[in-house]
Image: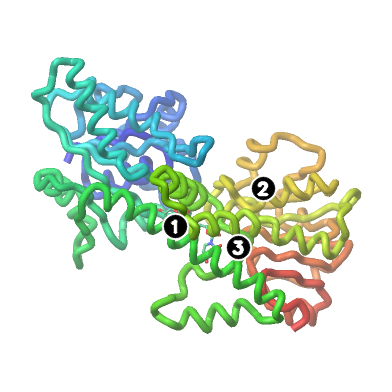
Amino acid sequence: MNVTVFGSGYVGLVQAAVLAEVGHNILCIDIDEKKVEDLKNGIIPIYEPGLSPLIERNLKNGTLNFSTNASKGVEHGEVIFIAVGTPPDEDGSADLRHVLAVAKSIATYMAGHKVIVNKSTVPVGTADKVSKAIAAQLAERNAKNLTFEVVSNPEFLKEGSAVSDCMRPDRIIIGTSSPSAEDALRQLYAPFNRNHEKIITMDVRSAELAKYAANCMLATKISFMNEMAQIADHVGADIEQVRQGIGSDPRIGYHFIYAGIGYGGSCFPKDVKALISTASQMGISPGILNAVEERNQAQKSYLLEKIKEHFGNDLNGKTIALWGLAFKPNTDDMREAPSRTLMEQLWQLGAKVQAFDPQAMEECQRIYGVREDMQLCGTKEVALSGADALIIATEWQQFKAIDTKAVIEALNNPVIFDGRNLYEPKHMNDNGIDYYCVGRPKNK
Ligand code: UDX
């Protein structure tokens, strides 16, 4: 099928590459000329495992192309994806400017029937807004006879495993009440719908809400466990044992019940805020969502409280090693990363930070520039050297096995603040390390 994807950000790019890989003919449109030029040469703006070879292969065999030419894009695709950004507005609601601009372009250039697919995470009612924007522009062109359908088809990919999530989706939600649009998407997704039925069809608004409900449910699980961890800390229980004790109940499950220093990234924080905003606009008080958001904000400062407990409120003259900058492993993304809150708070208290991350160093440099109180180190060992404490903010694989002797040798004080519960408190204690983590007794 000829498919156009508007937007070569995270979602658009992965979707385009994966659709090209199974044999569809994809044209990906972006307004950023430099980005498009880079992509044509196989230079990819994000780090995502498996994405680079996919793009290279499909560029070479001609099934994947990039362009800034919107008119060409509209002409090319019988199915057109809108996968542009929806950054949060000041009040937390999703900013639809880019989505509606694409809708307008589609209506400006279309010459025949089009199936338009909302892939970006957008508030309930956006498909209707896109339809209205297209209809208005068609009326302007005196082209009311042209037909189109707007479908909601939310993505569920996770950063770090986006390619495999897209290749092997758990479910494919198609929100439309048009049988012909449903048929088009069934055909498009047939290569991903082998072995068992993954397609779930529903009306447009339910599909739009399903996406938010999924992310908000997951964010709720995490915030709930973070609250339990704080309770565990105070009553002398161990959140890791509690986790196993409750995860074994299939109604609860083992996924997304790891306590830590809060969720970050581009989806959870944004989607929770956007759904709070939607609910509030409807006059509903979203008590649960507000609590999830509040707990997450507080959780990002959880380690700092322990650091203050240990060192006092003045960190002038202290150097802190920080392992992990990305909001989670296997990505270079630092959007809403707990590491940022931590670093900024440490700087405020006068500390210097020596940081290491396997992927996100460039991104960190881009965000913070050059600062005297931030040193980006080439290895995790260099980051430790001469520091007064080690903080762990991201659970990268390479941090999981720790050489306690080397840590004790490198640090001025053998103290670790672990925001991801990577080590056994007893092992740390036995090896002479003062070990603080989240929801686990210190001296077990
Ligand atoms: C998420 C959803 O998982 C995905 O389905 C959706 O399409 C986009 O949002 P992503 O933001 O890439 O994906 O990351 P995810 O792996 O879900 O992790 C989100 C955050 O939650 C990370 O900061 C992670 O550290 C944190 N987390 C996750 C926990 O603190 N505890 C857990 O048990 C799980």
Q: Mark 3 or 2 closer to N-term?
A: 2
Element on which disc 3 rests:
loop
* The residue at label 3 has a CB less than 8 Å from ligand 1: yes
What scheme was used to colour the molecule?
rainbow
Residue drawn 85% across the image and 46% down it = 350
The CA span between labels 3 and 1 is 22 Å
The CA span between labels 2 and 1 is 22 Å
Element on which disc 2 rests:
helix
**What is the residue that sits farthest to the front in this orientation?**
283
Q: Quadrant of residue 111?
A: top left
**248 left or right, relative to 338:** left
Residue 49, compared with residue 277, is above or below; it is below
Element on which disc 1 rests:
helix
The dot on residue 216 is 1
Amino acid bearing label 1: Cys
* Mark 3, residue position: 395
Residue drawn 34% across the image and 26% down it = 101
